[in-house]
Amino acid sequence: MEAIKRTKIGKVLKSESYGSSVCVKGWVRTKRGSKNVAFLALNDGSTIHNIQIVADFEIIDETLLSRIHTGASLSVIGSLIESQGTGQKVEVKAESIEVLGEANPDEYPLQPKKHSLEFLREKAHLRFRTNTFSAVFRIRHAMAFAIHQFFNGKGFYYMHSPIITGSDAEGAGEMFQVTTLDLDKLPKTEDGKVDYSKDFFGKLTNLTVSGQLEGELAALALGEIYTFGPTFRAENSNTSRHLAEFWMIEPEMAFYDIKDNMDLAEEMLKYLVQYALDNCRDDLEFLQNRLLEEEKLKPQNERSDLPLIEKLEFVTKNDFVRLAYTEAIDILIKSKPNQKGQFQYPVEWGIDLQSEHERFLVEKHYKKPVILTDYPKQIKAFYMKQNEDGKTVRAMDVLFPGIGEIIGGSQREESYEKLKARIDEMGIHEADMWWFLETRKFGTVPHSGYGLGFERLMLFVTGMGNIRDVIPFARTPKNAEF
RNA sequence: UCCUUCUUAGCUCAGUUGGUUAGAGCACCUGACUGUUAAUCAGGGGGUCCUUGGUUCAAGUCCAAGAGAGGGAGCCA
């Protein structure tokens, strides 16, 4: 038979050229049979939907069909016809089927049924082949693409901050050390310490915990930049919201004050959510239905207020609440759970807000995203701009329902003296920070920036509950399989 | 790292106050069925009850330690 060019299944399903010959390739999701005919659901990743292949035993050899099970890969040539069944509009009546790769049903772990996410986490190499994960990773692509589109459209430059860093002053968490030294035979200095001058870079180096400091350097010349890359934290965090390796978007903007910063963050989040609504409809609908099914098993009070798509639409249509830390503490002190002593951690000015406090503000009190600003300086990083009150800094955290902090940022301290004083106060090694300080010495300007956790955005957009399920291969304590 | 729950067939799970041969549904194999929608119906094969040690006449079940996983917390994005 003459070769026909493959058409992706997403396109075939939208076609109405009945009678035309098509070639589709993909992986079998289910096989159903009766006496004279078999039905194969075929998926190639181009859409959440499968194409139904009809294999008439008078045309397709039954021994060939016996080699086909869930998971097998096929190339099918046939004619596109209007479906005689009710579940789909079009289907392919097979004229020839080539088995590209068999999948032994005794060994292939995926079945045409619901698997637990925990089970699929251990089969991360195959979970792309499930509806849920193919939807999640198509959306992940769309979000990454939309981020570039958003910033490019605003004249931001995509800046590549280094992955390996020689400064340990970033202060965002425990770091992974990078070395080529032989750990069994470490070179030592005279006083018995490791001699890093013998290491690859001639000094102690780590994987980055943030591209922010380098991002600031670029912003103070290019104007508006963003980074988007992997970030590494060696924290022993075992939660559904933390990874040891995750992706972060960090815009830095010259001449932006804290309000400009908040405006940008809000506009960006709404743009991204709207992009998903406009471009990932089928996948969102699938994930929404999946969540609704899952929630049927939960007691009423644990169910979410809105279905996924309505929740996303709500975010795009409503302004975020903007609130100073001091006001937030007031609200919390006067709140019912506090009056009734239901908070585990007591509320008073100066504390770092705990999950339970953030959740109260976002999920109970306002029921919408909240941007908190002007935190006490003691609980925030050294580079944040100090307010005139001497007590607070121009930090901003964007809090989302169900997720908590999705963005953390601030206006940056542009005064050389104030920044240096803060570095001294916090005991940061000044010699490592000379380059950062020089930007404030030479032509300093007010500027701002923030960090968006890409996987936390993914949690929100997909409605998934565990961050390990929105990144292809999760790196967490005691787990770097695949 | 802390608190808590869990670990039984390939998957999801049941297994009573400790008791004799450990079960179900799905998946797989065989057969039936005139186009199915996670097809259906009948039959069949399939077990290191997470590991180690202990208590007991007897442990899937009780106790201890360890491993792994889930949920919550801390750290944060």
Image (spheres, coloured by chain):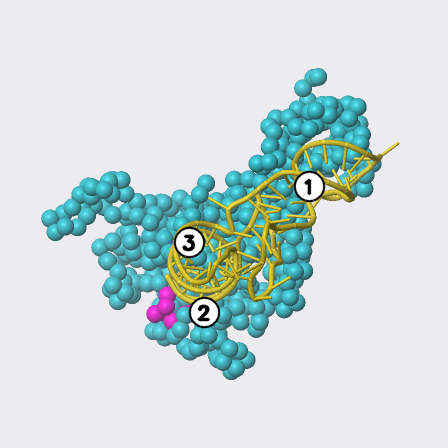
Task: State the cyan chain.
Answer: A
Shade representing chain B: yellow
- Above or below, B46 against A151 in this view is above
Percent position of residue A119, x then y? 55, 48
Snapshot quadrant of residue B36: top right
Q: Secondary structure at mark 2?
A: loop
Q: Mark 1 or 2 closer to N-term?
A: 1
Pick the front one: A339 or A371? A339
Q: Is the residue at mark 2 from the same chain as the one at mark 3? A: yes
Residue type beneath disc 2: Gln
**Chain letter of the residue carrying label 1:** A
Q: Earlier in the sequence, mark 2 or mark 3?
A: 3
Q: Is residue A277 on the magenta stretch?
A: no
For label 1, the SS is loop
Compare residues A308 and A398 and report the one nearer the observer: A308
Residue reaching furthest top? Answer: A1
Q: CA distance from mark 1 to mark 2?
A: 42 Å
Q: Residue at x 50, y 66 (%)?
A: A371
Residue A343 screen position, x and y as percent: 48, 76
Q: Which residue is mark 1?
A: A49
Residue A100 seen anywhere in this rendered image of the structure: yes
For the residues carrying marks 1 and 3, which lies nearer the camera in this image? 1
Q: Which region of the structure is painted magenta? A: A374-380
Locate residue B45 relative to residue A196 in the image: left or right: right
The residue that appears at 70% across and 28% down in the rendered structure is A65
Crowding at mark 1 (Cα within 10 Å: few <14, some 14-19, many 20+): some
Q: State the residue at coordinates (25%, 53%).
A: A432
Image location of residue A36, percent across then percent down? 80, 30
> Which residue is disc 3 drawn over?
A252
Residue under circle 2? A354
Q: CA distance from mark 2 to mark 3?
A: 27 Å
